[in-house]
Image (spheres, rainbow, N blue to C red):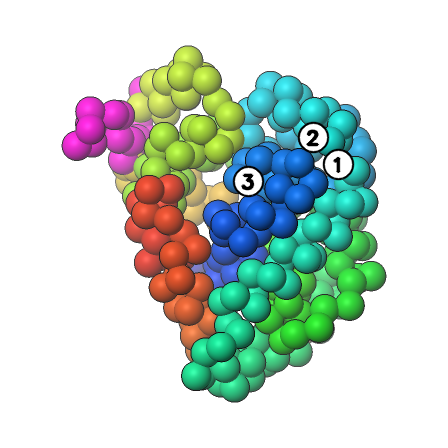
């Protein structure tokens, strides 16, 4: 990381990502998806996130998601669209976000301060979104299209809309960077797991749909390449740990990813970017303390607050 500016953009982007993804393990969100006949968790989340793409072939979704098992997506997605339409799921996700944000922020004593923080984030990031070139960013472009037609009613819903577009924009750039660096999706997932700051190994494997054989093959490949070591956790499951070589590879990918978003962020000066650190931290602390990132899924939930 070659500058304080880049470090600050990464920090804000990570918190934006957490703000977006805070809905994924919410019972309130799952209940909204269940109204359409979907199982809370992986089913509902896959339908909701891919819905802006429309009723596309599973290969399009697995390519966009990148670190999900293509076989898993190919098996699940057609079944989902037999139960609910993409158009219904676009609205269902907005309804779910509205319910989740009301539950999270609705009756807090510090609601005025948090509303101000969300408003500052939304207004400050607006020029960044306006400067985004979505060419080559399929999921981000589709997501921006549906969010562009959404009339959010609260500061927190508006913040989620902005965070989601920004998250998918950097995410598509990150996928391109992984492809450039020659890192397959399952390897990228396992390297993240191996940092000890993201998914627990079994949760990552299950939610992304990899078989034991696929997971073991990738783990062996990365260990032989010197990118991870493998020990056992307290339950006897394999526990990958990233090596310095693995961290170097991840940093190479992040540098490439930084380049894919630099033009959009160039509309903000260094001081303005730095001004986003405090409000983003305040919002994420509330979300992290709410249990939005369960400890049985994430190794260090507190890291989601940046």
* Residue 66 horizontal/vertical position (percent): 59, 33
Q: Which disc is residue 84 wearing? A: 1
* Residue 19 horizontal/vertical position (percent): 52, 61
Q: Nearer the viewer, residue 257 or 233?
A: 233
Q: Residue furthest bottom?
A: 112
Q: Secondary structure at mark 3?
A: loop
Q: Secondary structure at mark 1?
A: loop
Q: Which mark is first along the chain, 3 or 2? A: 3
Residue 276 in view, yes or no: no
* Residue 31 horizontal/vertical position (percent): 58, 48
Q: Secondary structure at mark 2?
A: helix
Q: Which residues are magenta?
A: 224-241
Location of mark 3 (residue): 40
Q: Residue at x 51, y 72 (%)?
A: 105
Residue 127 in view, yes or no: yes
Q: Which mark is first along the chain, 1 or 3? A: 3
Location of mark 2 (residue): 80
Q: Are marks 2 and 1 in contact (CB under 8 Å)?
A: yes
Which image quarter: residue 297? top left
Q: Which disc is residue 270 wearing? A: none
What's the distance in space between the residues labelled 2 and 1, CA to CA? 6 Å
């Amino acid at each position: 990381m070659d500058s304080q500016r880049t470090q600050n953009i990464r920090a804000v982007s990570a918190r934006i990502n957490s703000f977006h993804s805070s809905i994924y393990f919410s019972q309130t969100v799952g209940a909204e998806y269940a109204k359409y006949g979907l199982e809370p968790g992986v089913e509902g989340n896959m339908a909701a996130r891919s819905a802006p793409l429309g009723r596309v072939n599973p290969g399009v979704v697995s390519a966009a998601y990148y670190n999900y098992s293509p076989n898993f997506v190919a098996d699940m997605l057609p079944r989902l669209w037999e139960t609910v339409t993409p158009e219904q799921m676009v609205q269902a996700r907005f309804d779910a976000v509205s319910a989740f944000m009301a539950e999270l922020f609705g009756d807090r004593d510090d609601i005025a301060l948090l509303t101000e923080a969300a408003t500052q984030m939304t207004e400050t990031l607006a020029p960044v979104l306006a400067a985004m070139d979505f060419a080559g960013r399929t999921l981000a472009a589709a997501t921006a299209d549906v969010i562009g037609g959404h009339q959010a009613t609260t500061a927190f819903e508006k913040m989620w809309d902005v965070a989601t577009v920004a998250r998918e924009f950097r995410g598509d750039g990150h996928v391109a960077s992984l492809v450039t660096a020659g890192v397959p999706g399952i390897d990228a997932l396992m390297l993240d797991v191996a940092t000890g700051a993201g998914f627990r190994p079994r949760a990552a494997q299950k939610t992304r749909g990899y078989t034991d054989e696929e997971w073991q093959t990738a783990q062996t490949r990365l260990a032989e390449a010197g990118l991870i070591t493998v020990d056992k956790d307290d339950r006897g499951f394999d526990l990958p740990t990233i090596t310095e070589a693995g961290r170097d590879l991840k940093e190479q990918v992040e540098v490439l990813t930084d380049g894919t978003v630099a033009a959009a962020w160039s509309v903000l000066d260094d001081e303005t970017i730095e001004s986003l650190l405090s409000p983003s931290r305040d919002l994420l602390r509330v979300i992290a303390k709410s249990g939005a990132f369960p400890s049985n899924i994430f190794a260090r939930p507190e890291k989601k607050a940046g």
